[in-house]
Amino acid sequence: MNDVRFYKLLISVNALIPLGLLLIDASNGRLGANPIEFFLRTTGVLTLTFLLITLAVTPLRKIFGWNSLIKYRRMLGLFAFFYGCLHLVTYSIFDKSLGFSAIVADVIQRPFIAIGMIAFTLLVPLAITSTNGMVKRLGGKNWARLHKLAYVAAILGVIHFWMIVKSDIFYPALFGVVLATSFFIRLVWPKKQAIQRAIN
Ligand code: HEM
C-alpha cells in the first residue's frame, strides 16, 4: 500500500469512528434522555467540523507548504457531506417522521432550520461535482468558482449553530473564529507573499 492510500484509509477510519461510537452508544441506550436530539446535534457538529477541516486545507498549504494535503481534500469534503446527509436523515425521519408538511412548517417557523436547509442544499452540487470527470467537464476555473460555495455553506452552518444555542455561544463562536481565520489567510496570504517578493 502506498502512502496516499494509507493516509486515506487512516482518515476514513478516523472519520467513521464518531459514527461507530454513536451507533454503539445508541444500541446500548447510552445517548441520554433524548437520543434523537443527541444524534442530531452530534451529526450537525461533525458536518461543520469536516467542512472546516476541508476549508483549512488551502490555508495550511499556503502557510506550511503542505501541498500533498490536496490529495485528501475531496474525501474530507465528502465526509462533511456524508455527515450532513445523516443529519438531514435524522431530522427528517426520526424527528419529523418524514412528514413533508411538518418539515415545511418547521422551515417556515424556525429560521435556523431554513438556514440549515440552505447550507445543506449548497453542499449537494459540491458533492456531485467532486469527481475528476466533473472537474474536467466544468473546467478548473469554473469548478473552483463553484466550490467557493463551501465557504457560504460553512458560514450558514455557523449561523445555524449560533441560532440554536441559547446562552453558551462558546462553540459556535469557536467554529466562527476558525472559519474566519481560514478565510482571512486565503485572502491575505498571496498578497503578503507578493509584497515579500517585491521587497526581496
Ligand atoms: C439539512 C438541513 C438541516 C436541518 C433540517 C438541520 C436541523 C437541525 C436541528 C433540528 C438541530 C438540533 C436543534 C436542537 O437540538 O435544538 C441541528 C443542530 C445542528 N446543526 Fe443542523 N440542520 C441542517 C443542516 C446543517 C448543516 C449543513 C450543518 C453544518 C454545516 C449543521 C450544523 C448543525 C450544528 C453544528 C448543530 C448544533 C449542534 C449542537 O447543538 O451541539 N446543520 N440542526
Image: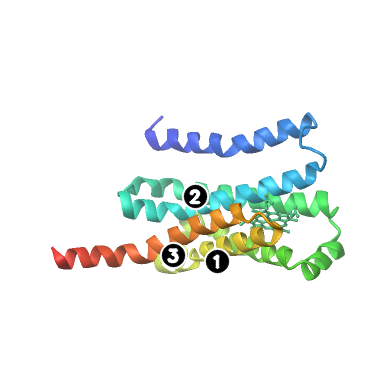
Cα separation, mark 3 vs mark 1, equals: 14 Å
Disc marking residue 144: 3
Dot 1: element: helix
Where is 170 relative to 199, above or below?
A: above
**Residue 10 position within the rendered picture, expressed as x and y whole percent measured from the top left:** 49, 34
- The answer to which of marks 2 and 1 sits earlier in the sequence is 2
- Three-letter residue code for mark 2: Ile
Graded by Cα atoms within 10 Å as few (under 14), some (14 to 19) or many (20 or more), the crowding at tag 1 reads: some
- The answer to which of marks 3 and 1 sits earlier in the sequence is 3
Task: List the residue tagged with mark 2.
Answer: 53
Instruction: Tell me which residue sits at (79%, 37%) in the image.
Output: 32
> In front here: 53 or 11?
53
How many numbered discs?
3
Where is 4 relative to 174, above or below?
A: above
Image quadrant where one finds the N terminus? top left
Disc marking residue 152: 1
Instruction: Tell me which residue sits at (67%, 33%) in the image.
Output: 21
